Image (tube, rainbow, N blue to C red):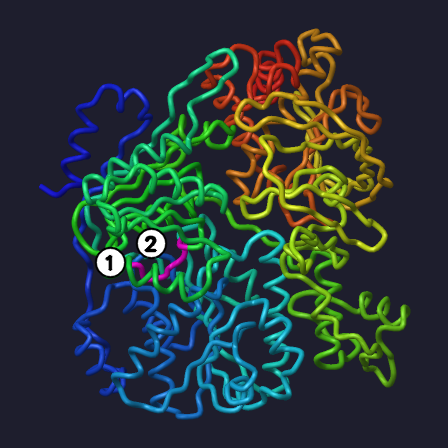
């Protein structure tokens, strides 16, 4: 019996441990499903695969090769460590062996994944001894190499940001690539959702437009972790039909998946023992059993805290290596490569990481995965749990929940997690602001002809607008770029608006930009005296220059975070759809006027209010989309206005968190506004709006699946052990009113009982 199996048996027999377990799922081992190497492969490639121990392919790999051979676009959706890399490397290399001028672009969401996949590709090509040149092209690529890659690179490995700013605007320098481009590979497709995915879809529109200019129509191979709508997302990204391949043929070892909820230490306030401390205790037990383990946590600060606690608790002799390491953004590349190698070799026994190691970097044969807090989506949770048990033998995935509503809903509703497909990934490439920005970039790259579409989007009105403001010049039916500016550099793929507020750290001798927030969120997040948390590190905002779009921050260590009080005036501009039964529900366009007037200092963990302060900033305006539910007075059972306000406020605290489960987004992607008597409806109304200019499709989905979300919210309240409301459900009792829990529950019953 292995050390892990001994520990699992001990935990099963320990009543103190089992009291905190809400689900123990044992996923049985499964044999693989195999097919012979196809005869269509070049003999050199087939022989190299055999030398590498690949005598047969998994069934999904064989299906991918057949579809690629038929000239189809494909999307491969299988779990972590199921060999998706071969689904694109084999077709691309096979094409090169048939045509030595063939080219391909590989898109990965992170630099680390690009480097890892490049190493895998070079190992395959190196054994074949062929002149296939593959290179990464990103911000770290040495200037001296860039020209050589542009001229002679057969496979260019990059990321969407570099494609957006470094390749497409300079396509004339990449003529050889585009004239011979046969394949575009998009890995980790599930990462391209929300605003980021909407931007990436437009980058692909620009890429395809340039390919047409060079008379090429490359095929797409997309790979993804399991999501509910992979074919829909793939077709939205590339705007072409795709063949879905999701029949996983890879073998699987036995995995124990445990949901663990730390014990309650204050039932009335709903306070639980720290998830961080429970994770540290469990990780130490695994370390003592010599079980190679990865521990995921949500922030850089969490990584450093857990790493410190674990290293302090070790019992090695002086000078002996502990084998406990941290891994996160901010470590030097050489240090990260050393840690990855240590994991593969076995010298690193425990690694504490942010989600930087969630994606498919090869880190060897880990036995256990601990997750300190719910990773945010079902897809990410399976990705992280899949980092253990990649080869053979029993493995463990253990999720330790914190006190947030999202965590508590998942941990107390394990059937939701294990019994349904993961979330839907949504994008909206035609968001007017995002689309206009990319039309600007596309016009810089190539002139637009009158009547020309941009992917599936009609953009004549946008072109006329840009011509009217002097950005484009219209002559002889063609729109030409006029400005001196280089538009792609001004546009971040991570936010909707061009006008971002940059965050500048002035703690060091040389001030440096550490991040940015969109202009509409800036008053909430980076007002003066706000605590801005970046990668787990705390910074206090010294000054916000709203006119110049700069926030100056200084590193601090405090025991509280800040929460600004946002006064929102919401006006409905247009209704796209509505339906009235017992309640009125609708979806439409709204205008948000937001004013931040004060902020609260809230202690970590206990959520005590430590004081308030003023905010003096101008009002901001945003047009977006919203979903709303209005309650007729007769349906609310005679609740007094104060009770209605309390109940609506409780729902406003809870619903965005629960909805994020269904939209595969962050709880901050949605904002809620409650009005006891809304001017537009004349009734008690709850509004949920997309927290991005123009909206990205969340509110439309809420309109369609609202019952699922409100049922989940009801379960979250019922299962919460607090008496009147707490941070794990409708908000602390002092925030949501004396009995926010019961009033919110009454309103949910009205929504769900519409007969």
Viewer-proximal residue among 208 and 717: 717
Under circle 1, the secondary element is loop
Q: Quadrant of the N terminus?
A: top left
- Tell me where residue 377 appears, x and y as whole percent: 47, 43
Viewer-proximal residue among 266 and 100: 266
Residue lying at the far left of the rendered structure: 1
- Local packing at callout 2 (Cα closer than 10 Å; few below 14, some 14-19, many 20+) is some
Under circle 2, the secondary element is loop
Residue 579 visible in the shown view: no
Main SS of residues in magenta:
loop
- Tell me where residue 156 appears, x and y as whole percent: 48, 79
* 8 left or right, relative to 721: left
Q: Quadrant of residue 255?
A: top left
The numbered disc on residue 538 is none
Q: Is residue 653 above or below residue 376?
A: above
Does the CB distance between marks 2 and 1 fall below 8 Å? yes
Which region shows up in magenta? 357-364
Viewer-proximal residue among 156 and 34: 156
| Residue 363 magenta-highlighted | yes
Viewer-proximal residue among 666 and 438: 666
- Tell me where residue 107 appears, x and y as whole percent: 49, 69
The residue wearing badge 1 is: 250
* 86 left or right, relative to 152: left
| Disc on the earlier residue, 2 or 1 | 2
Residue 213 visible in the shown view: yes
Q: Is residue 673 above or below residue 92?
A: above
Q: Quadrant of the C terminus?
A: top right
Q: Residue at x 84, y 26 (%)?
A: 679
| Residue 27 magenta-highlighted | no
Q: Residue at x 82, y 78 (%)?
A: 484
- Local packing at callout 1 (Cα closer than 10 Å; few below 14, some 14-19, many 20+) is many
The numbered disc on residue 79 is 2
């Amino acid at each position: 019996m292995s050390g892990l199996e001994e520990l699992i048996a001990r935990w099963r027999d320990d009543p103190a441990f089992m009291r905190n377990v809400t689900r123990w799922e044992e996923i049985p081992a499964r044999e693989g499903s195999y097919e012979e190497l196809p005869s269509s492969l070049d003999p050199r490639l087939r022989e190299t695969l055999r030398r590498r121990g690949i005598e047969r392919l998994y069934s999904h790999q064989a299906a991918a090769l057949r579809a690629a051979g038929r000239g189809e676009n494909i999307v491969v959706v299988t779990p972590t460590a199921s060999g998706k890399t071969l689904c694109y490397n084999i077709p691309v290399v096979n094409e090169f062996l048939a045509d030595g001028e063939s080219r391909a672009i590989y898109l990965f969401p992170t630099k680390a994944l690009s480097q890892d996949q490049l190493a895998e590709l070079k190992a395959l090509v190196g054994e074949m001894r062929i002149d296939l040149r593959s290179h990464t092209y990103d911000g770290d690529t040495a200037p001296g190499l860039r020209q050589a890659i542009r001229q002679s690179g057969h496979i260019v490995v990059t990321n969407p940001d570099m494609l957006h700013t470094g390749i497409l605007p300079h396509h004339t320098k990449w003529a050889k690539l585009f004239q011979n481009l046969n394949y575009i590979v998009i890995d980790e497709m599930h990462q391209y959702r929300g605003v980021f995915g909407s931007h990436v879809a437009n980058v692909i529109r620009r890429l395809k437009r340039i390919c047409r200019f060079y008379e090429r129509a490359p095929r797409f191979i997309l790979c993804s972790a399991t999501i509910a709508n992979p074919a829909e997302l793939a077709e939205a990204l590339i705007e072409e039909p795709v063949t879905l391949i999701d029949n996983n043929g890879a073998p699987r070892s036995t995995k124990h998946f445990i949901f663990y909820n730390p014990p309650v230490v204050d039932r009335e306030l709903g306070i639980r023992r720290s998830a961080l401390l429970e994770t540290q205790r469990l990780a130490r037990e695994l370390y003592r059993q010599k079980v190679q383990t990865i521990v995921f946590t949500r922030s850089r600060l969490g990584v450093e805290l857990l790493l410190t606690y674990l290293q302090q608790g070790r019992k090695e002799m002086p000078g002996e290596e502990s084998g406990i390491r941290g891994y996160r953004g901010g470590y030097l590349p050489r240090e990260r490569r050393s840690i990855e190698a240590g994991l593969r070799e076995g010298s690193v026994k425990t690694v504490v990481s942010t989600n930087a190691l969630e994606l498919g970097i090869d880190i060897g044969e880990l036995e256990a995965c601990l997750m300190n807090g719910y990773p945010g989506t079902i897809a990410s949770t399976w990705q992280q749990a899949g980092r253990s048990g990649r080869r053979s033998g029993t493995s463990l995935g253990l999720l330790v929940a914190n006190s947030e509503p999202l965590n508590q809903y998942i941990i107390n509703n394990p059937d939701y997690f294990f019994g349904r497909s993961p979330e839907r990934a949504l994008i909206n490439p035609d968001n007017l602001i995002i689309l206009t920005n990319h039309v600007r970039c596309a016009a810089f790259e190539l002139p637009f002809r009158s009547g020309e579409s941009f992917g599936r989007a009609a953009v004549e009105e946008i072109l006329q607008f840009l011509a009217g403001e002097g950005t484009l010049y219209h002559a002889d039916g063609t729109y030409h770029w006029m400005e001196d500016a280089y538009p792609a550099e001004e546009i971040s793929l991570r936010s909707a608006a061009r006008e971002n507020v940059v965050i500048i750290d002035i703690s060091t001798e040389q001030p440096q930009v550490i991040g940015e927030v969109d202009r509409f969120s800036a008053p909430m997040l980076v007002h003066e005296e706000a605590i801005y948390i970046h990668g787990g590190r705390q910074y206090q905002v010294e000054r916000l220059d709203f006119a110049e779009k700069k926030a100056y921050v200084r590193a601090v260590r405090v025991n509280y975070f800040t929460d600004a009080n946002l006064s929102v005036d919401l006006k409905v501009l247009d209704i796209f759809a509505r339906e009235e039964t017992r309640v009125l529900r609708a979806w439409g366009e709204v205008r948000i006027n937001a004013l931040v007037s004060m902020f609260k200092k809230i202690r970590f963990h206990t959520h005590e209010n430590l004081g308030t302060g003023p905010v003096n900033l101008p009002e901001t305006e945003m047009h977006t989309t919203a979903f709303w539910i209005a309650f007729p007075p007769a349906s609310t059972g005679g609740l007094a206005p104060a009770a209605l306000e309390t109940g609506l406020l409780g729902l406003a605290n809870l619903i965005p968190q629960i909805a994020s489960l269904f939209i595969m987004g962050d709880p901050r992607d949605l904002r809620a506004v409650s009005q006891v008597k809304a001017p537009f409806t004349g009734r008690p109304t709850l509004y949920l709006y997309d927290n991005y200019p123009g909206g990205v499709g969340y509110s439309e989905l809420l309109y369609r699946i609202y019952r699922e979300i409100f049922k989940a919210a009801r379960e979250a309240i019922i299962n919460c052990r607090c008496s009147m409301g707490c941070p794990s459900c409708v908000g602390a009792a002092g925030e949501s009113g004396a009995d926010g829990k019961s009033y919110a529950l009454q309103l949910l019953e009205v929504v769900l009982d519409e007969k």
